Image (cartoon, rainbow, N blue to C red):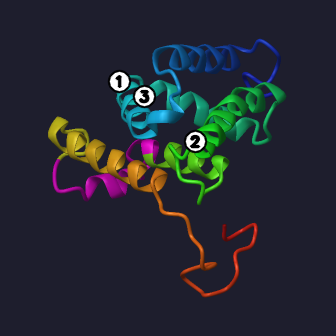
């Protein structure tokens, strides 16, 4: 039996598509201000946790990317590459890695295990705790996007850069 949402137009697939379309409209992607974008995305997802739940479930059901999903990311990758060419975003990290790391940082608390969240020094969803987490996340994205260019290969190992260590 096919999983719910796998068929074209399935209810979960429609909900995921609608949720992502709403997100894209409410939080426009801005490659020239990735820390600001990350903050706005964090806020949006905090107010609408169902978006992350739906996208996570959809990825479990269909781990391979559809052409539509690839098409949705391509303009963001192009915008980051353009920002890198204009020296607005570091060129040290590839555009795909910049976006993956930004998304990972933005969703880290929501995707953290309940066990980890239970060990926080304040209740996990306390507004003050979330304000501090948000500020740290934005600072991390800012640090990521402003890394200085590397001229000496891989600083950690002394080995020349490869496709995996760039």
Do labels 3 and 1 touch, CB within 8 Å?
no
Q: Residue at x 51, y 21 (%)?
A: 28
Q: Residue at x 42, y 28 (%)?
A: 49
Q: Earlier in the sequence, mark 2 or mark 1?
A: 1
Location of residue 113 in the rendering, given as x and y in whole percent from the top left corner: 42, 52
Instruction: Indicate which label's residue lies in the foreground, 3 or 2.
Output: 2
Does residue 74 sit above or below 150 in this rendering? above
Q: Residues within 10 Å of mark 3 (few under 14, many from 20)?
A: few
Q: Which residue is mark 2?
A: 86
Pick the residue in front: 26 or 54.
Answer: 26
Helix, strand or loop at disc 1?
helix
Q: Is residue 22 left or right of residue 159?
A: left
Location of residue 80 in the rendering, given as x and y in whole percent from the top left corner: 61, 39
Q: Which residues are magenta?
A: 106-122
Helix, strand or loop at disc 3?
helix
Helix, strand or loop at disc 2?
loop
Residue 3 lies in the magenta-colored region: no
Q: Measure the C-alpha gap from mark 3 to mark 1.
A: 6 Å
Q: Which residue is mark 3?
A: 49
Q: Judge whether residue 1 can be spotted in this image.
A: no
On-image quarter of the N terminus: top right
Q: Is residue 97 left or right of residue 50?
A: right
Q: Which residue is mark 1?
A: 47
Q: Residues within 10 Å of mark 1 (few under 14, many from 20)?
A: few
Q: Residue at x 40, y 40 (%)?
A: 35
Residue 111 lies in the magenta-colored region: yes
On-image quarter of the C terminus: bottom right
Does residue 106 sit above or below 153 in this rendering? above
Q: Residue at x 55, y 64 (%)?
A: 149
Q: Measure the C-alpha gap from mark 2 to mark 1.
A: 34 Å
Mostly what secondary structure, the magenta segment?
helix
């Amino acid at each position: 039996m096919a999983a719910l949402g796998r068929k074209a137009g399935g209810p979960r697939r429609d909900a995921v598509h609608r949720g992502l379309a709403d997100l894209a409209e409410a939080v426009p992607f801005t490659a020239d201000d990735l820390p600001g974008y990350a903050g706005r995305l964090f806020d949006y997802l905090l107010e609408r946790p169902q978006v992350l739940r739906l996208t996570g479930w959809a990825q479990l059901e269909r781990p391979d990317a559809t052409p539509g999903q690839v098409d949705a990311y391509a303009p963001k990758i192009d915008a980051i590459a353009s920002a890198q060419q204009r020296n607005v975003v570091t060129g040290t990290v590839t555009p795909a890695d910049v976006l993956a790391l930004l998304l990972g940082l933005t969703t880290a608390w929501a995707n953290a295990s309940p066990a980890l969240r239970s060990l926080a020094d304040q209740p996990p969803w306390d507004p003050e705790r979330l304000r501090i987490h948000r500020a740290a996340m934005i600072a991390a994205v800012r640090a990521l996007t402003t890394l200085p260019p590397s001229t000496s290969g891989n600083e950690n190992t002394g080995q020349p850069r490869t496709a995996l260590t760039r």
